[in-house]
Image (cartoon, rainbow, N blue to C red):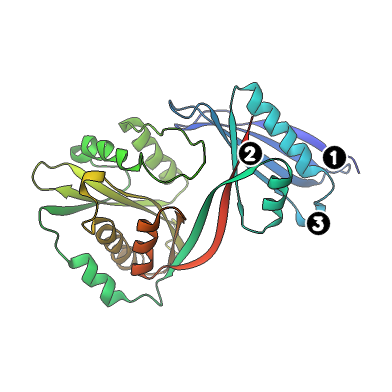
Amino acid sequence: MSMRLTALTAPEETSAGRRLAWLASDPDGSPVGHAFLRLFTKEGQRHLAELDIQVHPAERRRRAGSLLLDAAVAAARQDGRRSVIAQAETGSPGAGFLIAKGFRAALALTYARLSLAAADHSALTAVAETLHAGYRLATWEGTVPDELADAFVASRRAMDDMPMGAVDYGTVVWDLDRVRAAAAAIAARGDVLRTVVVIDRSDGSVVGFTELVVPGSGTGDAQHYGTAVLPEHRGRGLARWMKAVSIVQARERHPRLDGLLTDTADNNPHMRRVNDELGYLPTHTAHEYQLDL
């Protein structure tokens, strides 16, 4: 059976990159799969592309995936990229496909979920209400308040040494425009971004942050985004404190939520321990796979 590819192009760049897309269809014109290729455009990541390929289970092993991959890789090469990354659940058909096509496993990830119905809310509240000498908390919804904007942007360097295994992820450079654009993108799709930060009382600097994205409906599962503490302030329980506050506030302000989702690199034992202590339970594992061009 011959497959047909239709190339699509997103009309505008986002703050982080631009996206190409392909649709695979059978001879009758019925869609059987698609591929999205994200071309990062920010300084420090212009060498990288991120790929997502999906093929309907009934249409697998009929070359749709291979055609989609070939088109995406060719586009990445033409754009001067040196690496393509893609994620797949461990042991899945997608993982087998990527390995067969020359991708290598570069980072293992553990996904976990906190059921709000089963969580120990007394213990979480106790952690959230524990004072940390020399520090205070601030929280907001949506984009960062103007009075904390510069300090919050400066705190993003806490992610610079985030364990990334062997992934050629480059350096994510954050400025205020990028911070605001990310918040605006979440709001535009109807979701709610909730941020908790720790502030050093001695100088007013933001030394750590955690972000949670809640579905606009206030139902289902919310998704943790970044959680990080500046290196010079680690080892003081600040990540655990922030995340506990985030959980307590999410339950209070979005009472119909079912749970909270998070993912952590397997070579980041400190954050995995924080999640374990707060009651998150592993759901599955995945890998970031990388193809060197």
Q: Can residue 220 be seen in this view?
A: no
Mark 3 belongs to which amino acid?
Ala
> Residue at the location (37% across, 75% down)?
119
Q: Is mark 1 on a helix, strand or loop?
A: loop
Q: In this figure, which residue is indicated by the disc labeled 2?
A: 36
Mark 1 belongs to which amino acid?
Met
Q: Earlier in the sequence, mark 3 or mark 1?
A: 1
| 211 vs 80, nearest the viewer | 80
Q: How far apart are marks 3 and 2 (CA)?
A: 20 Å
Q: Is mark 2 on a helix, strand or loop?
A: strand
Determine crowd level at label 3: few under 14, some 14-19, many 20+ residues with C-alpha closer than 10 A.
Answer: few
Q: Is mark 3 on a helix, strand or loop?
A: helix
Task: Point out residue 100 in the picture as x, y percentages from the top left corner.
Answer: 74, 45
Q: Which of marks 1 and 2 is nearer the N terminus?
A: 1
Q: Is label 3 in contact with label 2 (beta carbons under 8 Å)?
A: no
Q: In this figure, which residue is indicated by the disc labeled 1?
A: 3
Task: Point out residue 104 in the picture as x, y percentages from the top left corner.
Answer: 63, 43
Q: Distance between the residues labelled 3 and 1?
A: 14 Å
Q: Is label 1 in contact with label 2 (beta carbons under 8 Å)?
A: no
Q: In this figure, which residue is indicated by the disc labeled 3?
A: 58
Q: Is label 3 in contact with label 1 (beta carbons under 8 Å)?
A: no
Q: Is residue 109 visible?
A: yes
Task: Point out residue 163 in the picture as x, y percentages from the top left corner.
Answer: 42, 46
In-image side of 75 versus 143 (left or right): right
Determine crowd level at label 1: few under 14, some 14-19, many 20+ residues with C-alpha closer than 10 A.
Answer: some
Image quadrant where residue 128 sits:
bottom left
Q: How far apart are marks 1 and 2 (CA)?
A: 17 Å
> Residue at the location (26% across, 77% down)?
122
